[in-house]
Image (cartoon, rainbow, N blue to C red):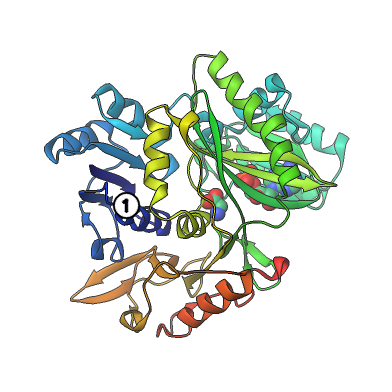
Amino acid sequence: MNILILGSGGREHALAWAVMQNPKCDKLMVAPGNAGIAMIADCAALDIEDGGAVANFAEENSIDFVIVGPEAPLAAGVADRLRDAGLLVFGPSAAAARLEASKSFTKEICDAAGAPTAAYGHFTDAEAARAHVRAHGAPIVVKADGLAAGKGVIIAETVAEAEAAIDDMFGGAFGGAGAEVVIEEFMTGEEASFFVLCDGIDVLPIGTAQDHKRVGEGDTGPNTGGMGAYSPAPVMTEAVVQAAMERIIRPTMAEMARRGTPYQGILFAGLMIEDGQPRLVEYNVRFGDPECQVLMMRLGAQALDLMQACAEGRLAECRVNWGDDHALTVVLAAEGYPGSYRKGSVITGLDTLPEDSFHMMFHAGTTETDGRVTASGGRVLNATARGATLQEARDRAYAMVDKVDWPQGFCRRDIGWRAL
Ligand code: AMP
Ligand code: GLY
């Protein structure tokens, strides 16, 4: 089977690594990829949000199966375009990708499905939004409706802060994403990420994880795309998983199918768990990054069989082979991230690292220049390890971090602290 993965981050390196373990994979191409991915697959420059260009590329390269990594091509309808061209695709249609692309759409689906989530109001007018905030008080959560690269959510501690966020959003701080605003009740509890494959009819949970969104140790400082993650998430007990499936995931999938827009792909549910009861924070229509890295480390080669069965509508016949294991990933980021950072610094020591089914240094923002690996993004490397216990996985991951020589990089030293 010839496979094409779309994307260029640590998530896509992890997907590529898992796919390559499977003997079914004859040829792997990744567009656009990065320096780490280039070591295991053929990388190609391609505008992955241009469905026509991707379809032509797939045809020219005899691709049998396309796996879409990030949300932007999905929201842009790339999966639809590829399916129209007769290709097998892992990833939802643009209509189903609205579960991530529009927060008000997700709220409306939750209402229709009876799925527990934060109470909310939806506004297209700043004055009405401000009045809602004054009536409900703080803390309160202000969200730009559209895709804002994870930056469109403000947890306001005071009414003044919430009003300032509303003014920013309607003032265009998030471009088109902020023309509509959702204001939510602030939920307390413990957050976890829950990953479920959906083929339009059947659903199959494939793992849980927790990430560390804040840049600083002890979960302090500004939000990032994620500074580390581990799987499984202890808070996701069997009972919580069951409750999430019955009250949130299945009703949502049934509602999507009822509307004629069945969901096919990975559904990433961000949950808030309080007193053993999960509520939905948000849906994403892709794997999390860096959560995907720990999931792939645990699933290995079967990830390809599962994604293929999902795309072919055969999930009902699938089982996940669970290992009694743990995985943890530490993100190495460029100094300054999530603010401004420099590109081009040289990273050495990568060739001294172990690479096996227990250790992988996944690349995120890296480029190869003159035979050297250089940093080309904010989040740059993901030291990822697996072990019999979370502590063992963590010790292995940090041992990898310590072998990397990159003075312009940093990482958090406390990934996994909540679970350990
Ligand atoms: P989102 O982009 O919707 O995932 O929001 C980013 C982060 O903000 C989430 O992962 C939560 O940590 C937090 N968050 C979002 N909505 C709420 C809410 N209603 N109550 C509490 N925290 C929230
Ligand atoms: N790590 C959170 C996300 O991928 O959205």
Q: Where 47 sits versus 89, above or below?
A: below
Q: Quadrant of the N terminus?
A: top left
299 or 38, which lies in front?
A: 299
Q: Disc 1 beta carbon < 8 A from ligand 2?
A: no
x, y percent for residue 145: 59, 34
x, y percent for residue 292: 48, 54
x, y percent for residue 57: 17, 39
For the question of whether residue 264 can be seen, the reply is no
309 or 140, which lies in front?
A: 309
Left or right side of 19 for 380: right
118 or 171, which lies in front?
A: 118
- The residue located at (75%, 43%) in the rendering is 239
Image quadrant where residue 364 sits: bottom left
Q: Where 142 sits versus 385, above or below?
A: above
Left or right side of 99 for 264: left
x, y percent for residue 197: 51, 37
Q: Where 72 sits versus 353, above or below?
A: above
- The residue located at (65%, 34%) in the rendering is 181
Q: Quadrant of the C terminus?
A: bottom right
Kind of residue at disc 1: Asn
Residue located beneath label 1 in the image: 22
Left or right side of 387 for 182: right
- The residue located at (66%, 23%) in the rendering is 108
Left or right side of 372 for 155: right
Image quadrant where residue 50 sits: top left
Badge 1 crowding class, 10 Å Cα cut-off, few under 14, some 14 to 19, many 20 or more, is some
Give the number of callouts.
Answer: 1
Image quadrant where residue 87 sits: top left
Q: Secondary structure at mark 1?
A: loop
For the question of whether residue 417 can be seen, the reply is yes
